[in-house]
Amino acid sequence: MGMAKYDRLLYILNLLRSRRNLNAETLAAECGVTERTIYRDIVALSEANIPIYYDRGYKYASGNFLPPLNFDIDEYITLKTALESSPLYHGGHSRKIIKSIKTKIEACLSPAVKEKKTIAPKTTSVEVKATHAGNINEKFYADVEDGIRRHRVINLTYNSIESGVMEREVEPYFLIFIERAFYFVGYCYRRNDLRTFRIDRIIDVKITEKTFEPRRDIDPAEYFQNSWGVFSGRPVDVEVILSGKAARVVSMSRHHRSEKVIPMPDGRVRYEVTVSGIEEICRWLIGFGGDAVIVKPLSLILEIKQRAGDILANYTQ
């Protein structure tokens, strides 16, 4: 769906202020409309006494439309990098919004900053890796967001790793980018519990007329407090003795907010942490091989033994 006419006219004005030699084809692609619509928009702007003229592309004749922003070149580059580094920049709907924000910012830069940005070197780059970001259905994302905003129950067809394709009725609560993908948390009527759903595993979603009263005890900042990644569940106290490379890894960087890294006299470390469930930390510890020895809980010891046995069986003749 294209943007509303008023928003599009303002967007075109900002584009003309920030770029040169824009033709109808380029403007149509930027706005998601036909060239015929762009011609009508140019006429509408001209009839509103907006000084637009054509000289190897459409141009805006006045510098008095928007006041310049008091950014210096470092502030502008930092803001631009932050916007382009956001995982939202990879999604259809949000990408359009961020591009619109960037255009408005560039239209309001002072002449000095506009000149400097053309020759400023790109010193910082941030890449947030996302798994299958290009496969996110823009409509599904927007429908989930709309359900959250309007407190509407959604009918979800979801492909779960554990249970396969299922129909669910869900109260959606919040969206979050975590562990390289977008998820939303909602109360699932089928499970009678809170669940985390990955956006790119949605097969179909429909907003119903059924409303719900938001549960006040669900806070995005606290929901994943003990999670190793995206899993939630009963808190589990984990204790591991790490040696070699594993000991150096945990000593040199932080992996969880609740962790304690306790050096031992022989160079090993005792690693203590409280996590929600053992699934994700189990996968992490397996990567250390023999450098990790689980002390507790017993459930994690048994799970590691089972998985190690399954791996060994694949290579036993």
Image (cartoon, helix red, strand yellow):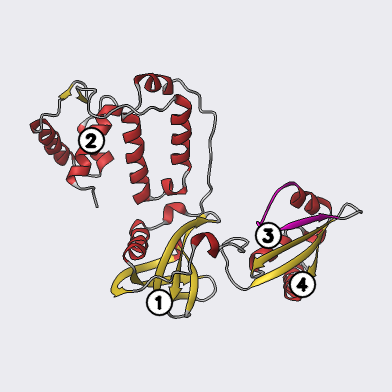
What secondary structure is marked by label 1? strand
For this view, does 253 lie left or right of residue 48?
Answer: right
Residue 301: give its label: 4
Which callout, 1 or 4, points at the residue further toward the start of the chain?
1
Q: Which residue bears the numbered disc 3?
A: 258
Residue located at (10% from left, 29% from top): 49
**Dot 3 amino acid type:** Ser
For this view, does 306 lie left or right of residue 78?
Answer: right
Which callout, 3 or 4, points at the residue further toward the start of the chain?
3
- Alpha carbons under labels 1 and 4: distance apart: 35 Å
**Dot 4 amino acid type:** Ile
Residue 192 screen position, x and y as percent: 47, 80
Q: Which residue bears the numbered disc 1?
A: 167
- Alpha carbons under labels 3 and 1: distance apart: 36 Å
Residue sitting nearer the eye, 59 or 310: 59
Q: Quadrant of residue 19?
A: top left
In the rendered structure, are the residues bearing label 3 and label 1 in contact, judged by CB atoms less than 8 Å apart?
no
- Alpha carbons under labels 1 and 2: distance apart: 43 Å
Which callout, 1 or 2, points at the residue further toward the start of the chain?
2
The range drawn in magenta is 252-263
Q: Is residue 35 covered in magenta? A: no
Residue 12: give its label: 2
Q: Nearer the viewer, mark 1 or mark 2?
A: 2
